[in-house]
Amino acid sequence: MIEFAQIGTIAGKEFRDRIRNRWVLAIAVVFAAFALVIAYFGSAQQGAVGFRSIEITIASLVSLVIYLIPLIALILGFDAIVGERERGSLDLLLTMPITRLELILGKYLGLSAALALSTVAGFGLAGLAMANQLDLYALLNYSGFILSSVLLGMTFLSLAVMISVFATDRAGASGLAIALWFFFVLVFDLLLLGALVATGGHYGGAIFPYLLLLNPADVFRVLNIFSLEDVRTLYGMATVFPEELASPWLLGGIMLLWIAAPLSIALWRFKR
Amino acid sequence: MANIIVKGQGVSRYFGAIRAVDGVDLDIRSGELFGLIGHNGAGKSTLFKMMLGLLPLSSGEINIDGESVSGRNFRNVRRKIGYLPENLALYDNLTGLETLHFFARLKGADVQQCAAKLERVGLADAANRRVREYSKGMRQRLGFAQALLGEPRLLFLDEPTNGLDPEAIREFFVILRDLQAQGVTMILTSHILADIQDRVDRLAIMKNGKIQSCGSVQALRETVNLPLILEIGGTVTVDQVAQMLDGLPVASIEARLDRLWVKLPREAKMQALTRLMTIGDVQDLQVREPSLEDVFFGLAE
């Protein structure tokens, strides 16, 4: 039987730690600054300065967030368990009346709350600054972008916690975290594109969109791009991505699966 | 017969071909101060971890107060336990009081008792200082306060005097005696055998994953049957003592530090004392029992 109070105690400590060491504040400032710079100067290359449209802003932010949030999440969570083990505090925690599931969930939820607060505060602040130029539709889209950014952070945080359970030391865990970031953010799409080009699009073209779902960063990209008509056209994604897969609910559900799966693997390993 | 609070039967733990703990049977009585000693690698830390439920057993079983520490009622069992690890690691960014609040919540203990626990270990003045500012001794005392949260019935203390100065060690054992008077059972390990030899009720000596001997320090002394030392003060000479003890199985007589040191078997003690007390030049006579360290090495041989 899960005791939620135990999860809350662990999560509360993790969250307060990040508030206290100003981690949340620092990341929120970075997000707010990037969002504002992109919103107001994103079109400078085209010779225009100032806010143009929420679609263009979100499209630019998606490109930024897809690099930044996975990296931040992996850095935040890679030592969640291995750090406790290496410091020697894990044994003491495990002698408490707490299960390993409660410990992992507590760690994960506390870190998720810190990352979510940074994301919502940072992008929310930028949203407030742009609010007078946004209509309700734009506000909804921007809110959707923030929510999906939170989900993206939570998926990579889940992967980070999984790494932290498997790794034998912090150095190894940090190496794995960086490798995972490279794979999902830089290498995965290149591999897919390479395979597609190498086969001249004759093989695997139909499963290409499904393969994108194997990468939470791509799911985030598709989720945002497909919720904005202008952006969909801009990216040309509509031509390759089947409509039936583009439901925000389905893609959101897939991101939730990306949260649950690594956490489940982490728990399985942690119990052994 | 006293209640058994910790019962281990056939407890074993294998790491591949290595038998870290090998078929240990152990009964620890309620309210006793029990020592667990052994060389590094003897298996005491592994046994400790199994008793705490941190390591699964390869075979056998351990019950605490009649229940398995990893069984269905593990929460109840663990709420009765306090643990001070050997290499204590606390959270540097928390204050002493916040540290105790955190562990009190996890244990389901009243957070109101945290300040009193800090006072008990002499850290009341440092309650609101960050742990990163604590000395090693202060951290150890904070760890001990943590172990006392929730009024545990059983304390596991792994090298508890690490980093403590002599005064703090004495205060630490005073607290242990107070706890024992309240019926708390304590199991402790220590490499400083002199610290525990006069303080534990019973102890177990581990070697190669097995319990080599178990009993009170005095019972172990008698088991090993090491010679006693008679320390003689006064103007008496070696020849006088040798003459007086003639016929007894005396191992050696040495003059050192203005005193004479006579080594002889335990069974000759009373006869030797009776004879020595008749020498007028003997002004002081003390019987030195073998130390726990002597017993430890005696058993190892």
Image (tube, coloured by chain):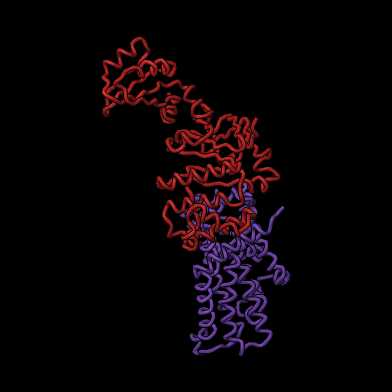
The residue located at (54%, 38%) in the rendering is B46
Please provide percent x and percent y for residue B180: 57, 41
Q: Quadrant of the N terminus of chain B?
A: top right
Position above or below: A40 against B81: below
Please provide percent x and percent y for residue B10: 62, 30
Please provide percent x and percent y for residue B224: 46, 22
Question: How many numbered circles does the render carry?
Answer: 0
Query: In the image shown, does A78 or B240 lie closer to the viewer?
Result: B240
Query: In the image shown, does A249 or B196 lie closer to the viewer?
Result: B196
**Furthest-right residue in this view:** A244
Please provide percent x and percent y for residue A253: 70, 65
**Residue A217: in sight, yes or no?**
no
Quarter holding residue B284: top left
Quarter holding residue B52: top right
Query: In the image shown, does A29 or B294 lie closer to the viewer?
Result: B294
Side (left or right) of B200 relative to A155: left
Query: In the image shown, does B225 or B54 lie closer to the viewer?
Result: B225
The residue located at (71%, 45%) in the rendering is B72
- Which chain did the renderer colour purple? A
**Furthest-top residue in this view:** B247
- Which chain did the renderer colour red? B
**Residue B252: in sight, yes or no?**
yes
Position above or below: A186 against B246: below
The residue located at (68%, 68%) in the rendering is A252
Position above or below: A36 against A24: below
Q: Quadrant of the C terminus of chain B?
A: top left
**Furthest-front residue in this view:** B280
